[in-house]
Each structure stands twice: as C-alpha cells, then as structure tokens.
Image (cartoon, rainbow, N blue to C red):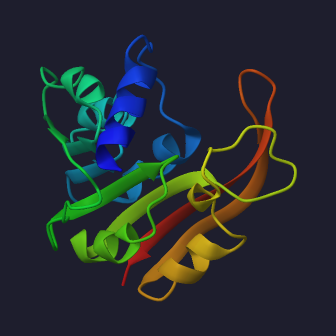
C-alpha cells in the first residue's frame, strides 16, 4: 500500500505549485502553542511547514512523497522527512504544536496525543462524510464521521474550537469539513 501511495502522491505533487498561504485554522490558532517545536503531518508541498518556520517554529515536516519532501529540503528551520505512516512512530512528548490538514489516518490519533508535550496543541482539518460532498477522497475511509474528531480527542484534550462546516473549493465543488483545535490536558 505504501508504495502505491508514494507513486500516487508523487504524481500529484510533480507539477504542483506550492501554495504559500496557510488555511485559516493554522494562521488563527498557531499562536496558542507555548513552545516552538512543531510537527506537520502529511505536509505535502509544505505550505504550513513554511508558514510555521516563518513564525519561529522548528518544524518536522513528514510526507510519503519524495517529490514533496525534496521541495522542503533547503528551507530553514524545517526538517523534512519521507515517512510511511503505516510504519512510522511519532516521538513521544516532543511537540508543542501538531498540524494535520486533509489527511486522515485514525491510527495516528493516539500517537499524536502522545507526541504532544503537556499543553501542546493539535490543529486538525479534513473532510467529513456527507451527501453534499461533490469532491471527496477516492477511499471513503479517508472521510470523518460526524463528531468523530471531537469525540476522540476530547478524551485527552480540551477542545478549544470545533466546527463542522460547508466549504467550496477553488473549482466550485461543495464539500463538508471538520476543523478542530485541541489542547492536551
């Protein structure tokens, strides 16, 4: 599975322009982190990693795509690594901030909590299963159930912000997303 994922994401990133504006969740809530050690899970071409680095963070940027990671290799304060999330283990008690956008691997949920330092913050945004979605991941397992993020993370974190909301992408496709800010207890 990992090799097929790598090929698919490399193809997707091959001719992709690097977005340089973070999503609203990241730009609004990054300031909640007390320290400056950050993790960007499934970082893609690194728009959030780059943003975090400009905000003074030392960022571990992880992705399966070697094309995406190579675009980050020369960036200051970014440690870009090719990883397979099927086998990679996050370091415990290391991060003040964890960012995960538009990637869903449920087995990472407990690892994310363990990887946070006390009072560390998780910023998470991804797609929600909904009949309104006009564009969605090819695998239904990559869609959250209603209330799923909040339900899981509220067991070990204070939910600072949570929203399930309708969005429209740049091509006019409707989709429903979930956004969460959680602070480790």
Q: Where is residue 38 in the image (x, y as percent from the top left)?
A: 24, 51
Q: Which residue is drawn at 45% across and 23% down?
A: 12
Residue 80 located left or right of residue 152: left
Q: Residue at x 31, y 48 (%)?
A: 2
Evaluate whether residue 34 shows in this view.
Answer: no
Q: Percent x, y for residue 173?
A: 80, 31
Choose top left, top right, bottom left or bottom right for residue 8. Answer: top left
Classify residue 157 as left or right of residue 92.
right
In the image shown, does 8 or 144 lie closer to the viewer?
A: 8
Decide if residue 40 is on the left or right side of residue 24. Answer: left
Q: Residue furthest right?
A: 132
Q: Is residue 152 visible?
A: yes
Give the quadrant of residue 82: top left
- Decide: is 170 above or below 38: above
Q: Residue at x 58, y 61 (%)?
A: 141
Q: Residue placed farthest to the bottom in the image? A: 155
Q: Quick check: 106 above or below 60?
A: below
Q: In the image, residue 106 lies at what x, y percent? A: 45, 69
In the figure, 125 relative to 114: above or below?
A: above
Q: In this view, does 174 lie above or below 71?
A: below
Of 82 and 58, which appears nearest the observer? Answer: 82
- Where the C terminus falls, by quadrant? bottom left
Toward the viewer: 76 or 137? 137
- The image quadrant of residue 151 is bottom right
* Residue at left offset 49%, top offset 57%: 104
Q: How many labels does the image show?
A: 0
Q: Nearer the viewer, residue 82 or 41?
A: 82
């Amino acid at each position: 599975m990992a090799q097929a994922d790598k090929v698919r994401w490399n193809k997707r990133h091959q001719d992709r322009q690097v977005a340089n504006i973070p999503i609203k969740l990241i730009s609004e809530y990054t300031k909640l982190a007390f320290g400056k050690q950050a993790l960007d899970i499934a970082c893609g071409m690194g728009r959030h990693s780059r943003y975090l680095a400009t905000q003074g963070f030392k960022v571990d940027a992880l992705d399966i795509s070697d094309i995406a990671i190579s675009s980050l290799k020369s960036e200051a304060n970014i440690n870009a690594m090719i990883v397979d999330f099927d086998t990679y283990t996050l370091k415990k008690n290391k991060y003040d901030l964890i960012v995960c956008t538009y990637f869903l691997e449920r087995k990472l949920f407990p690892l994310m909590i363990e990887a946070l330092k006390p009072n560390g913050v998780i910023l998470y945004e991804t797609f929600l299963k909904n009949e309104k979605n006009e564009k969605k991941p090819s695998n239904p397992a990559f869609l959250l159930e209603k209330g799923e993020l909040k339900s899981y993370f509220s067991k070990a974190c204070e939910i600072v912000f949570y929203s399930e909301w309708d969005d429209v992408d740049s091509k006019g496709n409707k989709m429903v997303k979930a956004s969460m800010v959680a602070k480790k207890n």
